Image (tube, rainbow, N blue to C red):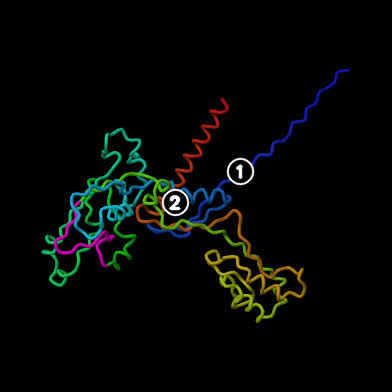
Amino acid sequence: KQKKKSSLKKKKKMPQQRFPKIEILSIQPHHIQFILSETDTSMANAIRRIMIAEVPTLAIDLVEYAENSSVLNDEYIAHRLGLLPIRYVPEGSMRGGDCHTAFLPHTECVCYDRCPRCSVEFELDVDFDKVNMTRPDQDRDLPLTVTSRDLISNNILVAPAHFLNEEEQDEAHDEGISIVKLGPGQNLKLKAIARMGISKEHAKWCPVAVATYRFWPIITINDEACQMLTMEQKQELVEACPDRILELDEITGNLVAVENAYEMATYTEDLKVAQDAMKKRPEDDDFVKVEPSTDRFVFSVETTGAMDAEEVLFSALRVLKDRMNYLAAEVEKLKD
């Protein structure tokens, strides 16, 4: 008798494949709010951390002084210059974009010291006595504020971001970001060199002022259980929640979630405590459940002005893709 050999193949459980999606809620040059869905916290946190620490931007990295007779020492002014947001606007565009294709990191450039491929030079030369002669009579006794507009770039595509938006520009008293104030007989002359880098190396290269996400709230209202409540009790539930994510429908009188609940939900215990006190038995179902979603996140990103908010997101996704491609290539090498 021939014995048939049977082998049971172990079924390998493949990880659940995800297809993340992005839905834009609001977008402005300096701010973007979007929903990242159909993924988990690992992906959400990776995007957030990349936007903060690994999106390349330009920042002043070296300052050479010719003269400084202001009240601030050289190191203090150099620090202030380093924190100025430097904006790269690609040719034919109006938006602050990703500079990684236009510049090389200084450590990777083959030049001896610096060149247009790896750096941008800014010159600043302000003399109080000379400028004061052109000022209105009522301003001549006041200190002269040196701002980011006094920095002259040798690259027409690169300039400091003087204001975050038009509203800030209209409300500002200065012509740009203040650097130092000069008095009679004082002047400041220097050359500043901007280079490309990432915030993981130094915070001055960070393109965002705020990059946060919050969990999308899943609000479940038990209509059947709520029918046992009086209008006073329903109103008490509305007021018990400090986030004000609930309201009473004017027509039906039922509890409903407000439209912008995702912006206000903080998952406090106040609502839970209030409805526990209204239950006849502790084991009864909750009237309202507010739970954080595990696959839907609301992002809020505000830039420093160096890049448009939309470009920061695109750049972060590009960096993440490049990292994944690099990892895949290294894994293939290990197989060989």
**Residue at 73% from the left image edge and 76% from the top image edge:** 228
Neighbor class of circle 1 (other Cα within 10 Å; few <14, some 14-19, many 20+) is few
* Residue in the foreground of this view, choosing between 77 and 170: 77
Disc number for residue 17: 1
335 vs 198, left or right, is right
Neighbor class of circle 2 (other Cα within 10 Å; few <14, some 14-19, many 20+) is many
Magenta region: 173-189
* Residue 136 spot, x, y in % from top left: 14, 69
Does 174 sit above or below residue 16?
below
Question: Callout 1, which amino acid?
Answer: Gln
Single out the residue that lies furthest toward the bottom: 232
Disc number for residue 286: none
* Residue 55 spot, x, y in % from top left: 41, 47
**Residue at 65% from the left image edge and 82% from the top image edge:** 232
Whole-number angstrom distance, CA of label 1 to CA of label 2 = 27 Å
The N terminus - image quarter: top right
What is the tally of numbered marks visible in this picture?
A: 2
The local secondary structure at tag 2 comes to helix
* Residue 235 spot, x, y in % from top left: 62, 79
* Residue in the foreground of this view, choosing between 178 and 58: 178
Disc number for residue 52: 2
